[in-house]
Amino acid sequence: MTNHLVGASVPRIDGAAKVTGAALYVDDYVVPGALYGATLRSDVPRGILRGIARDPSFDWTGITIATADDIPAENLVELIVDDQPLLAKSEIRHMYEPIALVACDDPVRLQRALKAIRVDVDPLPPVLGIDQALAKKAILYGDDNVFKRYVIEHELEGASIDQHIAECDVVLEGRYEVHHQEQLYIEPQGMIAWWEPDGVHVKGSLQCPYYIHKAMKRVFALPGDQVHIAQAVTGGGFGGKEEYPSVIAAHAALLAKVAGRPVRMIYGRKEDIEATTKRHPARTEITTGSTRDGELVALKVRCVMDGGAYVTLTPVVLSRGILHAAGAYRWRRARVEGIAVATNTPPNGAFRGFGAPQTIWAIERHMDRLAEKLGKDPLALRRRNVLRVGDTTVTGQVLRESVGVEECIERAVAESRYEEKRAAYASAPRDSRTRRGIGAAVFMHGAGFTGSGERRLKGKVQVDLERGGRLRIRTASTDIGQGTETVFRQIAATAADVGIDAIDFEVPCTTNVPDSGPTVASRTVMVVGSIVEQASKTVAERVRASEAFRAGASFAEAGDRLLDVEEVVSLVQYEPPVAAEWNDDTYRGDAYPTYSWGCDIAEVEVDLDTYETKVIGFWAAQDVGRAIHPVLCAGQIEGGTLQAIGWALHEAVVWKEGRIQNPRMTNYVIPTSKDAPAFRTILVEHAFSGGPGGAKGVGELPMDGGAPAIATAVDQAIDAVCYDLPLLPEDLLRAVQRSRR
């Protein structure tokens, strides 16, 4: 191949449209005759719904109302478990439960109509946290409030993990908690729905068109060819537009069906924060045994996650959480248990990192405490025990290739001058009212679906030969700001050995693209990109094998002649990146096709009068296999790191009796460009043989290491240990007060 676009930072394909305002987001579309839609929600976190009534003094002319009784088929949101109703019929499970849908051609009148509907609910005592759920005083799910439970056991050899730990020289116990986090994508949730003779049509802001497609088939009892789901330009997702868009799409479509007119449902920021899914809060208890000189021996973990009111994607989030709970380290023996419970808070769901940030926070905090107990530098302890090629994980997976974590550590340490700064800050005068600290975290993230997930899913890609020697990529993998359209064009052009301007990208719509699987799990480039690569290469080879090309015709001329004969030259292809050996019952085997690796180093400054913390430097060395587009790759790392900084230092969902007290951007605080530190992003490339050009996943990895790296730095600055997130000023004050007792 003479065309080498992989590894080049080419101009972003969608860049001009976005910066000039030509790109159309869902709220930009003008649909003649469309009504405005809105949702009537509960104002209690738990109760029995007795009914709804219209205020007779209100003029209901031109107002459409839909309830559970108007749903044509199944009143549910299709996901892992059929437990979530599309609209409440008899039971209220959280404060913002949707009860009815209302549509009107005047948005002001629509809001008045919502206030004129009376909801009759008998309140019940709510379950609002992990402890209440485990106490089982009220049963919300099953007979014990447990959504899902997993156990991983590694080399226990007939003895209990407690027995193995008791035999160790040094034993350490700890408990670590993390909180909700709101995705706060730049564009709120939004859908437009309408009905035509060929079925229902939905256009909106989304990550996974086929999730919505499956959900709509069940709500409306429609065959697949009568459900048409198309993506509008999407302003960010971060997991928040993975499963939740099925809810708002079905709501808009139901209103459109009842009203007989198109309906647009665009959430405002307040409703988006209140009603949509968030990162799962988690509590992780860890007990470890090690030798006196710092070799890790035995690990016991128990992680409990708060799933909220319905299962949604909680089992998968919990799964990924426990699969990362051992960290990037070798353990001779381990037992890892994961439990997810039901509460009367809005359902939690997908968020960048998908369970791994919760448990990596815990194991990294525990490693820092273990280092202190052993009298060792925390990064030196990590270096000694970090996984290498040939090592075995706690699921029994042998790491055969693409393990670049040692290089990540070395490069991050060198560029940050970690050792020099850590020593200097440790010996700095303690009477200063402003102190600095520096800390590190080492971590990994599984790329692709867990275990045999990719083989079961069989995500497909279609590549068409078109006139003029062009190739068209058809995939359900969406560009939600991360640059998929550009990167897929690079992969296809390189594989086919044509110019990038000869590659087209079909707008993801279930009518025109195959099901490539969801845009999640750090799989888009590594898994779907590898299929794009294979399919593009195969189609191009057909052209070059044609008689016309061998006779001297150009690629474009030979392609046109081939189309003259065959009319359609297209390939629908699926091939997993690797054949994983995995047992879903025992949770043993190859948990992921491969892992991405990282070392984050954070330098902070803490004001000891206000306990405000500023990140003054951040070094992220991350093994991505191969950076297809280095600038976009670095952008993913910096963006994910800034979200991790927000989770650690700025963000907190404030709850009172099941209600969110800060559902606005004025009081749900996220870091801005002014809060961003001077980033130094270091791309480490240990190629993975199953990825296009050697690429691995990068989207989630940056979320994992930022918070624990910052916490280690903060610990050094304030001479106290922080066990839980967030690290707000009041939390740091409590940590200091606790250390002085």
Image: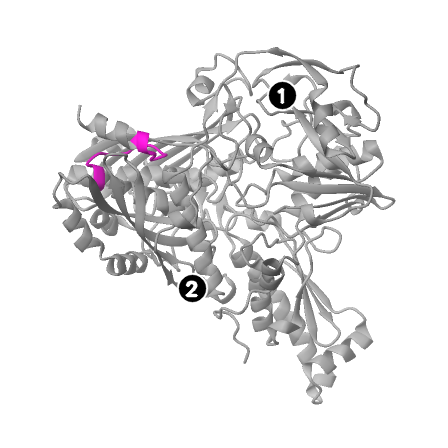
Q: Dot 1: what SS?
A: loop
Q: Is residue 296 left or right of residue 726?
A: left
The residue at the far bottom in this view is 552
Q: Residue at x 50, y 45 (%)?
A: 450
Q: Which residue is mark 2?
A: 687
| Secondary structure, magenta segment, majority class | loop
Q: Is residue 420 left or right of residue 211?
A: left
- Residue 42 shows which numbered tag? 1
Whether residue 631 is situated above or below residue 30 in the rendered picture: below
Q: Is residue 272 visible?
A: yes
- Mark 1 or mark 2, whichever is nearer to me: 1
Q: Quadrant of residue 557?
A: bottom right
Indicate the amino acid at tag 2: Ala
Q: Dot 2: what SS?
A: loop
**From the image, which quarter does the C terminus lie in?**
top left
Q: Quadrant of residue 73?
A: top right
Q: Position of residue 219 (x, y in %)?
A: 74, 33
Q: Quadrant of residue 436?
A: top left
Q: Is residue 261 left or right of residue 660?
A: right
